[in-house]
Image (cartoon, helix red, strand yellow):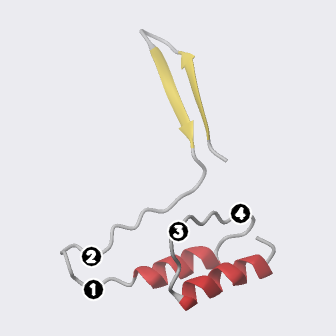
């Protein structure tokens, strides 16, 4: 879990530090409507989870992504 702290630092004002652990940012295709394989990106990301995997979705219609979640559970994630 990430943590944030604010402390008085050198000079004026306070400095901020934010530790969010590791994350990946995927922007997708450079043009609207252009092909991207977001499903493969998600599956690859989930396949590398080792201890925790948080998933927040309204619906899940992709069987390969659902399988990746189940596979992670099978690995003890």
Whole-percent x and y of residue 24? Answer: 48, 62
Q: Nearer the viewer, residue 15 or 73?
A: 73
Q: Which residue is mark 4?
A: 52
Mark 3–mark 2 Cα distance, whole angstroms, equals: 21 Å
Whole-percent x and y of residue 26? Answer: 40, 67
Q: Which residue is mark 2?
A: 29
Above or below, 39 against 45 in this view is below
Whole-percent x and y of residue 57? Answer: 53, 68
Q: How many circles with numbers are drawn on the protein? A: 4
Sequence-earlier tag: 4 or 3: 4
Mark 4–mark 2 Cα distance, whole angstroms, equals: 28 Å
Sequence-earlier tag: 4 or 2: 2
Quadrant position of the C terminus in the picture: bottom right
Sequence-earlier tag: 3 or 2: 2
Query: CB atoms at circles 4 and 2 under 8 Å apart?
Result: no
Q: Residue at x 47, y 78 (%)?
A: 41
Above or below, 70 against 28 in this view is below
Query: CB atoms at circles 1 and 2 under 8 Å apart?
Result: yes
Q: Which residue is mark 3?
A: 57
Give the farthest residue toward the left.
31
On residue 58, the disc is none
Q: Which residue is mark 1?
A: 35
Classify residue 65 by image quadrant.
Answer: bottom right
Element assignment for label 4:
loop
Q: Residue at x 21, y 81 (%)?
A: 33
Q: Residue at x 54, y 37 (%)?
A: 18
Element assignment for label 3:
loop
Question: Is the residue marked by circle 2 packed among few (<14), some (14-19), or many (20+) residues within 10 Å?
Answer: few
Question: Is the residue marked by circle 3 packed among few (<14), some (14-19), or many (20+) residues within 10 Å?
Answer: few
């Amino acid at each position: 879990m990430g943590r944030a702290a604010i402390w008085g630092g050198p000079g004026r004002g306070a400095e901020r530090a934010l530790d969010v652990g590791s994350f990946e940012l995927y922007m997708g295709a450079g043009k609207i409507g252009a092909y991207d394989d977001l499903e493969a990106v998600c599956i690859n990301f989930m396949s590398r989870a080792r201890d925790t995997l948080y998933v927040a979705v309204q619906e899940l219609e992709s069987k390969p992504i659902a399988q990746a979640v189940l596979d992670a559970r099978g690995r003890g994630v």
